[in-house]
Image (spheres, helix red, strand yellow):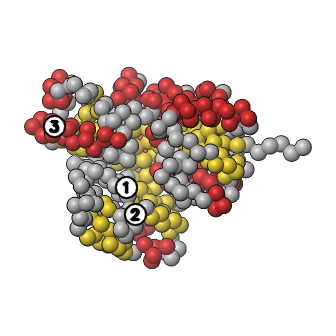
Amino acid sequence: MTPSRPTLVLLYQRVGLPWLFDSAERAGIDLVLVPRPDEQVDPDRLPAAVVELLPLDVAADPSGALEALRKRHEAAPFDGIVTLYDPFVPFVAEAAELLGLPGIGPDVARSAQDKRVMRERLEAAGLNVPRFVRLDPSDDPAACVAAAGLTFPVVVKPALGMSSLGVTRADSPTTLGAVVAEVRRVSAGTADGGAGLIVEEYLDGPEFAVESLVHEGRVQILSIGFKGDPRGPYFEESVYQAPAELPEAVRADVVREVSAAHAALGVTFGPTHTELRLRGGTVPHLLEMGARIGGSGVSHYIAENVTGIDFAGQALRLAAGLPPTHTVEEGLTRPVAAAANYIVPCGGHGTITSVHGLDELRADPRVDHVVQMLVPGDVVRPYPDFTGYPAFVLSRHSDLAEAERFHAHLETAVRIDYAPTTSEENPS
Ligand code: ADP
């Protein structure tokens, strides 16, 4: 009898994004896909690794979803459960614990997701943290910020937010109240309805993303990539270029800070995606760490092309309780090439009439994927509301300078035209 193939339940991964599915296929892992409710999945055109669809509404009925997973596991046991969708990282950790599967545990999952808990744990471990304060609905923002001794400018954000939704800079005590009210309005759709906020000092300096793989507490940093230097008041994502060019001492500080943050938050297993800024240009301060592969798999694309290591394949093996096929060594992996992601900016708002430049990019040999999310007819609301990013362009390059030149070209090559939106389409 042939041994059965390892099987993972994969929550909320878009089938339109190929990376996870391709890595699972290469790793010989079968996937039971819980599709996103907002994506139409054709059962006849599933990625090869997907052997079953298991529709569950985790957001609306988490205990019902847990019970359905328990029943599915009882009927036909699976080896692990995994997601790249940040809001469900705690749910996945809880399900894994309930079913006796590999996982980080719900407490660690929450510490990597709730920005208040994360700041407290990093601070307790003596890591670099800007001054911060929690803000509950009944709190007076100006009084709390003054009592905590924060220096302006500050950044106000939902504690359970994602994708920069609602994250807003406030430059003075006089504008703070209005900014807090606006952040609450914009983040009403987050896990706690935008009730819990955090206010922290603005970290001036360039931003970086760090992709890591953790096995038995050893943190291997696969890549450090440059993420631009957004100044606010809203923080739209723009570029991701890896490997970043950094002075050796700063690079060593980033590696130390990110490795120590894993220990502080208790993440001893799996993939992570960390974002940080170099305060004053040199001192790494974490913005957040996600206990998952970042960017719906974009982090895998970057890490794999920078290092030659199949990041998602290794992460999926760990989630299935299998040892990695590659030795996870502490510290930073030597880059072998460069990779980049260009996030097409909305560049306006209204009803999209055309998106220029993407067809040419699909034919460009440097470009592996053009992932288009918004198309003509879609309505883009003005900031700070977040409609979504129009498109990603993922590309490979010989070195960072070439990736930078390519992105400079994209700034003019890709353009979106809008028509004013009628009031029925945009009632607010
Ligand atoms: P989210 O989880 O919603 O993406 P983040 O905490 O990662 O929230 O913040 C989103 C973006 O906002 C960051 O990538 C960064 O550009 C900016 N940002 C957040 N906090 C700060 C801060 N304290 N100082 C400067 N920029 C910040």
Q: Secondary structure at mark 2?
A: loop
Question: Which one is nearer the viewer's eye here, 121 or 102?
Answer: 102
27 on left or right of 389: right
Please say whether residue 400 is visible from this viewpoint: no
Please state the horizontal and vertical placement of residue 370, each as a whole percent of the image.
48, 66
Amino acid type indicated by mark 1: Gly
Check whether the beta carbons of the residues at disc 2 and disc 1 lie within 8 A of each other: yes
Mark 2 residue type: Leu
Q: CA distance from mark 1 to mark 3?
A: 26 Å
**Badge 1 or badge 3: first in the primary sequence:** 3
Q: Nearer the viewer, residue 35 or 367?
A: 35
Q: Are marks 1 and 3 in contact (CB under 8 Å)?
A: no
Whether residue 14 is visible here, answered yes or no, is yes
For disc 1, the marked residue is 388
Closer mark to the observer between disc 3 and disc 2: 2
Q: Which residue is mark 3?
A: 176
For badge 3, the amino acid type reads: Leu
Q: CA distance from mark 2 to mark 1?
A: 8 Å
